[in-house]
Amino acid sequence: MVKVKGKKRITDVGRKAKDIVLPKNVIDIGKYIMNLLSAKRFIKKSEFMALLSREYRISGMTIERKLNDLQESHQIIKIRSDEFGRFGINDTDSRSVYIASKETKDMKDYIDAIFGLFKSQDADEIKQGVRALRQHGTTYFRKYFLDGQQLNILAEVLEKSLNDEKLKDDEFRNNLLMILFNEMMTNKTKPADEEPFLETLRKLSDLYPTVEFYSKPNNPIPYIIQILGIYRDPKVIDRLKEDAFNGNIPMFSSVASFYGNKFTAKVIEDSKIELLRLGVRLQKAGKKEALDFIENIQRQAAYNLQELQRNEYEKELYL
């Protein structure tokens, strides 16, 4: 317990601990920290230390000692700059340190345990890791983010599914692609090693013929197309040509949105001349429904592109 003097002023950080009831001249630093973190997942260490120093006249050495005690007893963790992205911390100062709650620590430990499964050679352990990661992402949306290196590991697991017979599983691939897509969409994070990831997506695209797979459950093609679209990969257009020539009328109406959305809009728009030539071929082949399909996709893409150009947050990722 530390005695304090002087009248206390309420600050932004202090307001988040307004539920704390303390004697007027005494503060339990540990209790203050844990109560504050129960209302806020993390706080910036320098700001918190400045608050205690200013409001309660507590020395930096005393605060530091208490923080170390709480860390050693596993009640808090300190988040450094290389992990900011995982917790959604928007701070460009590499010297900054944040203090996080036990809940955040438990979440980090759980994610680390899941990623431990991806090191296994056992396909069932890897599959369970993907299921657990998908469930965690659904339950704790936007409370923990995967960084580029973690997405790299998932991309490597996806690549492994090309050759490992036990991992050639549509539901497994679909869950894995969903995790990757959601991280790219919500946190603007991509696998650190781009080209191997794209090559895996291109190979997977060739494994799933449109006519056979669009109507089946756990079909990974929509995620593959949209992720390739984010990268503006020409494989999107190759796949679109195949669909136009080999698809049927019911399929056209169900898959047009996979090609004309905000993720694929730029690669569709950039391929207007190529799609014009495709239209000529379809016209000569008498494929009117396929022509309507292509035109519908181009209309959707053009509209979504205009919307993206007005949205600074999304423009950074998709354009």
Image (cartoon, rainbow, N blue to C red):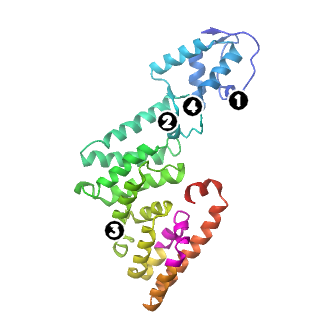
Q: Are marks 3 and 4 in contact (CB under 8 Å)?
A: no
Q: Within 10 Å of the Cα at label 1, are there few (<14), some (14-19), or many (20+) other Cα atoms? A: few
Would you say the residues marked 1 and 4 are in contact, meaning their CB atoms lie under 8 Å apart?
no
Viewer-proximal residue, 255 or 19? 255
Give the labeled residue for mark 3. Answer: 206
Circle nearer the viewer, 2 or 1: 2
* Residue that badge 2 annotates: 83
**Of callouts 2 and 1, the N-terminal one:** 1
Q: Secondary structure at mark 3?
A: helix
Indicate the quadrant where residue 1 lies. top right
Q: Which residue is mark 1?
A: 12
Q: What is the distance, in whole Å, between disc 1 and disc 3 at their CAs?
A: 55 Å
Per the rendered image, the range of residues in magenta is 255-274
Say which residue label 4 marks.
42
Name the element at disc 2.
helix
In the image, which disc is placed on residue 274? none
x, y percent for residue 229: 49, 63
Main secondary-structure element of the magenta-colored stretch: helix
At 67% across and 16% down in the image, what residue appears? 53
Asked if residue 175 shows in the view, the reply is no
Three-letter amino acid code at disc 2?
Answer: Glu
Q: What kind of residue is marked 1?
A: Asp
Marks 2 and 4, how far apart in space? Answer: 13 Å
Looking at the rendering, in which quadrant would you find the C terminus?
bottom right
The answer to which of marks 2 and 4 sits earlier in the sequence is: 4
Give the distance between the C-alpha atoms of the residues marked 3 and 2, in whole angstroms.
36 Å
Please tell me whether mark 4 sits on a helix, a strand or a loop.
Answer: strand
Classed neighbour count for the residue bearing mark 2: other residues with Cα under 10 Å, few (<14), some (14–19), many (≥20): some
As drawn, is 140 to the left or to the right of 46? left
The crowd level at tag 4 (other Cα within 10 Å; few <14, some 14-19, many 20+) is many
In which image quadrant can residue 316 be found? bottom right
